[in-house]
Image (tube, rainbow, N blue to C red):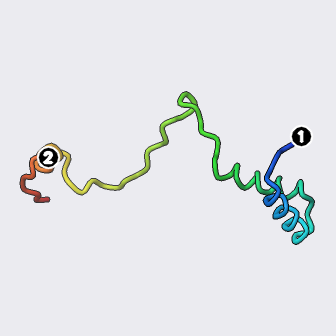
Amino acid sequence: MKRTQIQIPDPLYKEVKRLAALKDWSVSEVFRRAVEQLVTQYPCIKKAEEWELPAPGNLGKPKIASERWRDLLVDDETGGPETL
């Protein structure tokens, strides 16, 4: 385990001491738990080269025939009729 020094304002230190006494923890334990909680809120971001495209999921049977996709896309872009 690593040792470190930190500087915190006196009012915050008093609150840490109060919490430590309330929970019967050491001051170090209060800081350790606080840092663990904070670190979980900011997970490590993978580098772009580590990222992989997820496997595709099964979306089921298409609701429209593949021959009509182009027409429906054009209608969507131009505000044309929408008939499935």
Mark drawn on residue 77: 2
Residue 6 location, quadrant: top right
Q: Amino acid at mark 1?
A: Lys
Secondary structure of residue under mark 2: helix
- Nearer to me, 75 or 46: 46
Q: Which residue is mark 1?
A: 2
Q: Tell which circle, 1 or 2, labels the residue nearer the N-terminal end.
A: 1
- Residue that appears at 91% across and 42% down: 1
In the rendering, at what x and y percent does residue 50 appear? 58, 31
Secondary structure of residue under mark 1: loop
- Residue that appears at 91% across and 63% down: 25
Mark drawn on residue 41: none
Which quadrant: the C terminus? bottom left
Q: Amino acid at mark 2?
A: Glu
Q: Mark 2 Cα within 10 Å, few/some/many (few <14, many 20+)?
A: few
Residue 15 location, quadrant: bottom right
In the rendering, at what x and y percent does residue 56 appear? 43, 45
In the rendering, at what x and y percent does residue 82 appear? 11, 57
